[in-house]
Amino acid sequence: MTETADPGNGRAVVRRVRSYVLREGRLTRGQEQALETHWPRFGVEWLPRDGHLPVAELFATKQPVTLEIGFGMGTSLLEMASAEPQRNFLGVEVHRPGVGRLLIGAAAAELQNLRVLSVDAVELLKLGIAPASLDRIQIYFPDPWPKKKHHKRRIMNARFLGYCHAALAAGGTLMLATDWATYAEDMLVLLEEHPGFRNDAPEGGFAPSPWQRPLTKFEERGLREGRRIHDLAFTRLP
């Protein structure tokens, strides 16, 4: 959220700058049916006025919770939730075709450790996640908004990093990945300047790609186009 001065009276006006643009596309019949049939089982309803979500109570088993922001079509999130049944996953995505696709896969795999929200992730981190309630936050290949005039739309900035820090429990991890070098460098500087995080990379800088992160279509496209993949892993300090 940014503040700009109103030229008429000089007062500050808060204008919400979103990190995404809704390019809805058409829902397939299967995705539409999944939203109708499987949302009651996997979906979580939340509005900013509702306050904090009872994160631990969203799942049948109490275990560490990972928040995945922007899961796209859900393929990698399904793989991660299947590979780590000892961990709960809360996925956030605003694009309904991706939500529908994820619901199809979650129902087919009968996953017990996956729940889904279709809300603004910034509002969720700011208002909906209680302090120290997450074990991991992962944001893989967020929109890089490559044009300089659009950098203000990037999800990772000082304000949002503060929300992540508050939501993570001590020892929790913030994991990021991007194939845009300038965005990677900006995020690295931002995180290393924050006193509440420690870089987990053995020699500082960027981290090795974690085993938990499956290859995504965005990563594949970046590699095809000759871009390097940059991973970051930072632990929240006590």
Image (cartoon, rainbow, N blue to C red):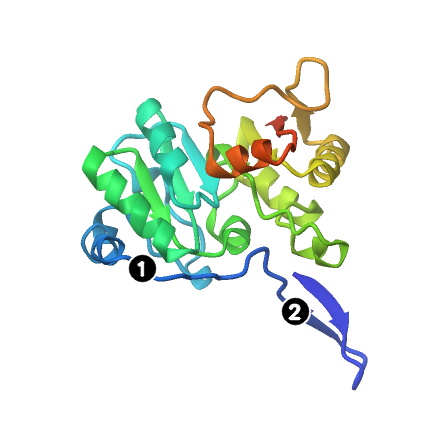
Q: Please tell me in which quadrant of the rendered image residue 168 appears.
A: top right
- What type is the residue that disc 2 sits on? Arg
* Residue 191 placement (x, y as % from top left): 70, 34
* Residue 234 placement (x, y as % from top left): 62, 27
**Mark seen at residue 15:** 2
* Residue 122 placement (x, y as % from top left): 55, 53
Residue in the foreground of this view, choosing between 111 and 59: 111
Q: Point out the frontmost of discs 2 and 1.
A: 1
Residue shown at 47% from the left, 37% from the top: 217
Task: Reply above or below: 8 against 72.
Answer: below
Q: Is residue 176 visible?
A: no
Label 2–label 1 contact, CB within 8 A: no
Describe residue 36's horizontal placement relative to residue 156 as left or right. Answer: left
Residue in the foreground of this view, choosing between 112 and 83: 83
Q: Earlier in the sequence, mark 2 or mark 1?
A: 2
Total number of numbered labels? 2
Residue shown at 62% from the left, 29% from the top: 229
- What type is the residue that disc 1 sits on? Leu
Task: Reply above or below: 56 against 14.
Answer: above
Task: Reply above or below: 35 against 222.
Answer: below
Residue shown at 57% from the left, 33% from the top: 224
**Mark seen at residue 27:** 1
* Residue 126 placement (x, y as % from top left): 55, 52
What is the residue that sits farthest to the bottom in this orientation? 8
SS of the residue under disc 2: strand
Residue in the foreground of this view, choosing between 73 and 49: 73
Q: Residues within 10 Å of mark 2 (few under 14, many from 20)?
A: few
Q: Please tell me in which quadrant of the rendered image residue 205 appears.
A: top right
Image quarter hosting the N terminus = bottom right
